Amino acid sequence: MKFTDGYYSHHPMVDYVNAMDPQAYNQGAPGEPDVTLGIGDIGMSVPMGISAANVAGIYSKIRMGAGKLEIQFPGYRTGQRNAQTPGMLGEDQRQALREMQQANEVRFTTHASFGLMGMMGRDERGNFSLYGANQDLMELKRAIDFQADMGGGSVVMHSGEFERPMTDMILDDETGRVNLARDRTGRLLVRQAHTQEVDAKFDLLDDRTSQKMETVQKDRMVAYPVWRKAKEDYYGEDQDRNKVLIKKGDYLDYQNRKIRDPYDPIKGRVPEYNSETGRFSTKLMHFDDFRKEAAEKNEWIQKNWKRTMNTSKEWYEDPEWYYKKIYPEEQFLHATLETQEGHARGWALQYGQDTDNILKAIDKIEKAQAFYQKLEASIPEEEKWKIMKQSDEVRSLVGSGLIPPETKLPSAILSDTMREIRKRLEFSRQASVSQEQQAQDTAETREHLITPIKRLERHGVRMYAEAGIHALQKSRDPNNPVVVAVENLFPERFGGHIEELKWVIRKSRDRMVELLTKPYIEEGVSRNPVDMNEKKYKAGLLQENPFYLGIGREEAEKLAEKHIKTTLDTGHLNMWRKYWQNDPKLSKEENESKFKEWYLTQVESLAKDRMVGNVHLADNFGYQDDHLSPGQGNAPITEVVSILKKYGYDKAYTVEPGADASTDLSDFHGLMKTWRLFGSTIYGVGLGAPQIPTRWTDVQYSYFGQNKPPYYVFGGYAPSNDWTLWSAVPME
């Protein structure tokens, strides 16, 4: 027989070699890392309502031999028979589970609702809500409470915060700006479609409502002004008439003075004017142009941080910098909104430009009316015809020959004129004010349109931090704390990439430290109603911190690291395979090796940072999350375990054998396949001939699922081999 990738190239279900032979599955060979896991190390998932209907169903898995179980809750908020929630297991069931753990020496972990996908509060329409995020936090908290009742351990929840284009997985934080989609040479590693590099789409949110507002597309061109800039260095003046050095590229006004704040909507940069055409200059700009535009604006913000933010901190010392910096997709949409804002401001000026003249005219008319009313009162009725005149309106109609001439008293003509001029004033006022309001609304919208990662950084990680604090508060055993373990979900969503997941964990831990150590925080507990118009509110109103423990930062960091970790899902990570871009210069085997290298580098990065708190062992062929048993797909699972053991990981390994419930005799067979893969031993008693090897198939397809007495037991149920019954009847 021929070995391929650690097992026989031909391996029918009932023809495996003896699992106690480590070389059968490439285990323990000389010079190879030890990846052997025992039966007690590997557990299985039990989705409540799917794999088990009740506590008795959980117990049946233990009786089969599982030493660890992850109790999973598919239900979201409201539970049902086939999708249960932690709230459906009452105190009697929880007490039974606690006794079950103790009596059988097993350990439970928990998987929070499958419906949880990050802490952004995403609804079924793709919008986000702070209130929805808080409801999701409550969902996570009740899973934490359940796990605390089990004595401690990890609580798994999905990441998958928001969709982002796979070709532009930008992590822009304190360590710098990096695109995770490319390697060090710049070669693109993954993409969802062959056009995605040029037509990638970015969603933007309104940070006031968290709703998805706009989608920016890379291949869309946007008309943008050609700004007036200095073409060389020279000494000149700024807008305050101060002598300054004007450098090439500085923004200038039409008097060739340096503009102090180029991004001021009133006194900021101005477009080039072409005197020959009488038009202002514009040009079409691409998404890449707005990358440069955003970088330039960020540089200006950094240089002017103290003045514009009214702070003594430098930009790199101030947490607000992360929120104030501009992303290319934001600047892309700002261009359109700036045009709309400028258009509205222009019309506001147009409509309002005659207002002063109209008000002066009204004043003069009122004085004339008073004069003529007094004059008319002093003239006898039969003499008033002498001062009557034709109004302008009547005169124009008479000139056309349509109606006979008509005359009016001056006061009457002035009253008619006053009515007309007041209409003009009303029109100017309404039109100008509405345009000014539109300009301000547009500016406000532009200010509050953000990329989703900002929403995640400001509010989402706060939810994770509060969950970590809840886990801290519910933990009873310091040696077995309750841990929030955020799982890498699907590649299409933020958090699916391991570096994104690490970003979430780092940010969440930092926020948890802040909540534990600062007596006052933003959005804390307010004793008085918040005045939305107060300047201090806009600058960040500090309120009492309901989570403050008064501990030092070092202690808080240790607590955050203990209670917020990750769940590594080997199957989810393998799904990047379908988006992997093979190098045409390499062979099939070399490209496979490249993907495997990338995969294991992600795992090592996570393990090296000591962030792993739980592991899901699932397999697939890289297309869908099929939940094959480890070794049945093409994920490098044994290598993953080797890396984890190298960095000291000793917590739960959970098999999620979903496919085996349908394609094999039971989901438990998926767990047995995993035991077999990792070289777990079998203990046999009876009269078996010594020359007949002990096979996993004897257990897997003779003990379970077949109508004959069991000859083998394993795990904690294995009896001593020091004695047998006098009749030599096999033990059950």
Image (cartoon, helix red, strand yellow):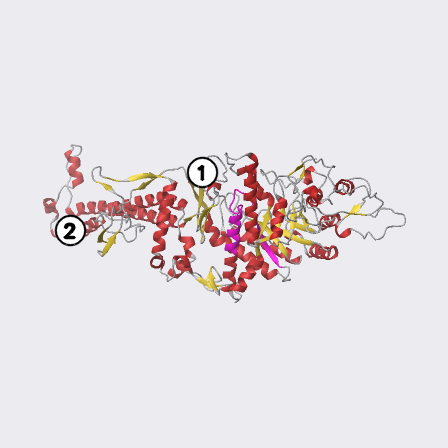
Residue pointed to by mark 1? 197
Q: Residues within 10 Å of mark 1 (few under 14, many from 20)?
A: some
Seen from this angle, which residue lies furthest top? 401
In magenta, the rendered stretch is 481-508
Nearest the camera: 254 or 243? Answer: 243
Q: CA distance from mark 1 to mark 2?
A: 72 Å
Q: Which mark is residue 49?
A: none
Camera sees residue 579: yes
Nearest the camera: 431 or 528? Answer: 528
Camera sees residue 667: no
Q: Is residue 263 above or below residue 474?
A: above
Q: Position of residue 186 (x, y in %)?
A: 45, 42
Mark 1 or mark 2, earlier in chain: 1
Q: Position of residue 346 (x, y in %)?
A: 28, 45
Q: Position of residue 154 (x, y in %)?
A: 62, 54
Q: Disc 1 on helix, strand or loop?
A: helix
Instruction: Give me the residue at 46% from left, 42% from top.
Output: 185
Task: Assess whether residue 228 is covered by the magenta stretch.
Answer: no
Q: Is residue 717 left or right of residue 144?
A: right
The quadrant of the image that shows the N terminus is top right
Q: Position of residue 257 (x, y in %)?
A: 23, 51
Task: Assess whether residue 489 is covered by the magenta stretch.
Answer: yes
Q: How many marks?
A: 2
Q: Disc 2 on helix, strand or loop?
A: helix
Seen from this angle, which residue lies furthest front? 30
Q: Is residue 429 above or below residue 480?
A: above
Instruction: Give me the residue at 73% from left, 44% from top.
Output: 21
Q: Is residue 665 left or right of residue 428?
A: right
Residue pointed to by mark 2? 368
Instruction: Give me the residue at 56% from left, 58% from top.
Output: 561
Q: Is residue 263 left or right of residue 482?
A: left
Query: Looking at the picture, which amino acid does disc 2 mark?
Result: Ala
